[in-house]
């Protein structure tokens, strides 16, 4: 069985995935690993195959030298990244020495920080694939040269290659291909013969008085039901990466079937809107990803179970629940010194090679994007990565998505939940009609609204479901109203009622109860509270 699962993992992670959305913008500086120092006569030295600079006689190259470099990596990966840079310095034959400062910045925060001030940003940085378009627009990514693009295409899985692509060009190096979700379960509650049936799982949990943790009031998760019935939602951009249209059929007969599947879960007394490791607090099923693997393994012990998502049945037809899949990428900031830019791309290629990706799997359980690495024993023997590979057959690569969509789509679930068990088709259809109307409104938004900042959070009796207006004075935005807030109240300031630009990177948490105006410096991203009166 282990051998079969290993083969399945390798096969699934190599499957070609549907193309990501998103157009290209004005081209960023193009160094992409290619030697940039002009030879006599103004011609550039030609890079060797794969984007590597050709060594000169004696083993050095036109890239030889010492470069001061700042790298942003997730906190957990800082030490490993430092050691990998050291290994690059001792092993590369181009005479490159990287003097690296590695700072802890998460993949989720890197894009916002870069866009705020590209000049002050890192030279290399880890980021989530859904940020690619906005980083290109901000000229925060180097467009890869031909050799570097070939390196990406030749060495990585099809889905991760697409994640690094915008239009016909490539702008980043795949790091991981594990940003997806599947199902963990308690084998003492859900027997193995039931794991393929949503209805059986619900019945098992209800009979045992256990919960099903499934964050369906989150668009990233509820979209899986629609993908499972054959629906799609593709945002269309122009050449500058601006969203101009959407091709979406959630509000359809297939979408109604998906709504019925969601209804099965959210109207069960066992349902909990969560994707955290809840086995210690009464759950027998948790839909989440690899990031919770170690915690859940410890919580369940010998009752640990993991599998791809189940199927559900509507009118005699079975539908396997789908999901989003995603990648983490390594970006190179455009450089004024083209030679340094080429050296940085050599380092980026090293940090995303098979050996370095396997090291991240060994230390953190991250699923690799490199085609050689996905076949390594440490990957094929990891039950969570095996389940992720099984689910990948039903997954849709996460494309560039308008930031407002996440709020719009999550309401489908809350509307279905409010209708209750046994709600007729017309009630479910009403939820889908509302969704379609909200999508249309995105393209009717005025420039004034699109550029304005608002406050959203657990503020003024709202629960992340209302945008509270702010007024600008230059770069300083202040909430129109003062809010009475308890300690622990959380919020963000976001632009255009979307999540593409939002501050601070982590939720602002009120430390001391009081009545405050919220103030944002849009130039720096700093959020502060101003006491009323």
Image (cartoon, rainbow, N blue to C red):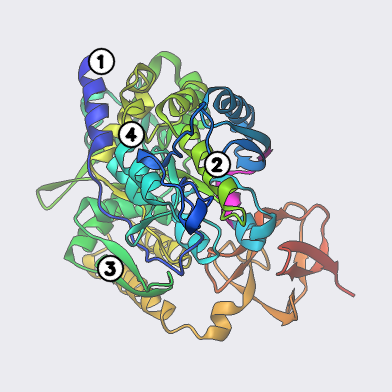
Residue at (30% x, 63% y) in the render: 233
Neighbor class of circle 1 (other Cα within 10 Å; few <14, some 14-19, many 20+) is few
Earlier-in-chain disc, 1 versus 2:
1
Cβ atoms under marks 3 and 2 closer than 8 Å? no
In this rendering, the answer to whether 356 lies above or below 476 is above
Where disc 2 sits, the SS reads helix
- Dot 3: element: strand
State which tag comes first along the sequence, 3 or 4.
Answer: 3
Residue closest to the eye, 330 or 407: 330
Task: Pinpoint residue 444: horizontal percent, then vertical percent.
Answer: 43, 84
- Nearer-N-terminus badge (3/2): 3
User: Which span of residues is magenta-colored?
Assistant: 102-111
Q: Which residue is mark 2?
A: 343
Sequence-wise, the earlier of marks 3 and 1 is 1
What residue is shown at x 50% (from left), y 38% (from top)? 346
Q: Are marks 3 and 1 in contact (CB under 8 Å)?
A: no
Front residue (pair 156, 273): 156
In the structure shown, which secondary structural element does the residue marked by tag 4 occupy?
A: helix
Q: Which mark is residue 388?
A: 4
State how far apart marks 4 and 2 are (Cα). 35 Å
Q: Is residue 219 left or right of residue 371?
A: right
Secondary structure under the numbered disc 1 in the rendered image: helix
Residue placed furthest toward the right = 533
Could you tell me how far apart the alpha carbons at marks 3 and 1 are, in whole angstroms? 39 Å
Whether residue 203 is visible: no
Residue 468 horizontal/vertical position (percent): 64, 74
Q: Which residue lies under the disc numbered 1?
A: 2
As measured in the structure, the alpha-carbon distance from the residue carrying label 3 to the one carrying label 2 is 43 Å
Quarter assignment of residue 199? top left
Distance from Cα at disc 1 to Cα at disc 4: 15 Å
């Amino acid at each position: 069985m282990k051998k079969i699962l290993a083969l399945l993992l390798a096969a699934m992670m190599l499957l070609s995935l549907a193309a990501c959305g998103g157009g290209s913008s004005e081209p960023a500086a193009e160094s992409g690993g290619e030697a940039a120092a002009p030879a006599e006569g103004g011609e550039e030295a030609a890079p060797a195959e794969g984007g590597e600079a050709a060594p000169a006689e004696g083993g050095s190259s036109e890239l030889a030298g010492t470069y001061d470099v700042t790298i942003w990596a997730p906190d957990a990966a800082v030490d490993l990244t430092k050691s990998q840079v050291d290994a690059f310095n001792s092993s590369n034959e181009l005479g490159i020495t990287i003097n690296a400062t590695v700072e802890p910045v998460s993949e989720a925060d890197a894009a916002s920080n870069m866009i705020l001030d590209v000049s002050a940003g890192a030279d290399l940085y880890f980021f989530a694939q859904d940020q690619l378009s906005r980083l290109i627009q901000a000229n925060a990514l180097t467009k890869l040269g031909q050799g570097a693009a070939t390196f990406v295409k030749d060495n990585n899985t099809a889905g991760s290659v697409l994640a690094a692509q915008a239009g016909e060009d490539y702008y980043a190096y795949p790091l991981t291909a594990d940003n997806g979700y599947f199902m963990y379960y308690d084998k003492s509650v859900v027997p193995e013969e039931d794991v393929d049936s949503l209805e059986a799982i619900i019945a098992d949990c209800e009979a045992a008085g256990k919960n099903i943790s499934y964050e369906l009031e989150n668009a990233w998760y509820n979209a899986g039901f629609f993908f499972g019935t054959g629906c799609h939602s593709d945002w269309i951009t122009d050449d500058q990466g601006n969203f101009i249209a959407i091709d979406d059929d959630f509000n359809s007969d297939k979408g109604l079937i998906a709504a019925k599947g969601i209804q099965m879960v959210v109207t069960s007394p066992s349902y909990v809107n969560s994707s955290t490791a809840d086995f210690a607090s009464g759950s027998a099923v948790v839909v989440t990803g690899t990031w919770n693997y170690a915690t859940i393994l410890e919580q369940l012990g010998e009752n640990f179970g993991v599998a791809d998502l189940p199927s559900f049945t509507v009118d005699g037809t079975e539908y396997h629940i789908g999901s989003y899949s995603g990648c983490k990428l390594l970006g190179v900031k455009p450089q004024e010194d083209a030679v340094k830019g080429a050296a940085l791309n050599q380092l980026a290629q090293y940090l995303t090679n098979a050996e370095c990706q396997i090291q991240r799997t060994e230390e953190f359980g991250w699923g690799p994007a490199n085609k050689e690495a996905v076949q390594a024993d440490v990957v094929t023997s990891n039950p969570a990565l095996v389940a992720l590979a099984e689910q990948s057959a039903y997954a849709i690569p996460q494309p560039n998505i308008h930031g407002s969509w996440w709020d719009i789509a999550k309401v489908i679930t809350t509307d279905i939940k409010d209708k209750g068990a046994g709600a007729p088709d017309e009630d479910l259809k009403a939820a889908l009609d509302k969704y379609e109307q909200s999508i249309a409104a995105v393209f009717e938004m005025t420039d004034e609204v699109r550029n304005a900042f608002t406050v959203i959070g657990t503020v003024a009796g709202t629960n992340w479901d209302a945008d509270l207006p702010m007024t600008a004075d230059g770069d300083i935005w202040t909430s129109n109203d003062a809010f009475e807030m308890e300690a622990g109240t959380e919020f963000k300031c976001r632009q255009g009622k979307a999540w593409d630009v939002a501050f601070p990177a982590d939720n602002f948490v009120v430390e001391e109860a009081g009545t405050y105006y919220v103030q944002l410096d849009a130039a720096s991203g700093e959020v502060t509270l101003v006491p009323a009166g």
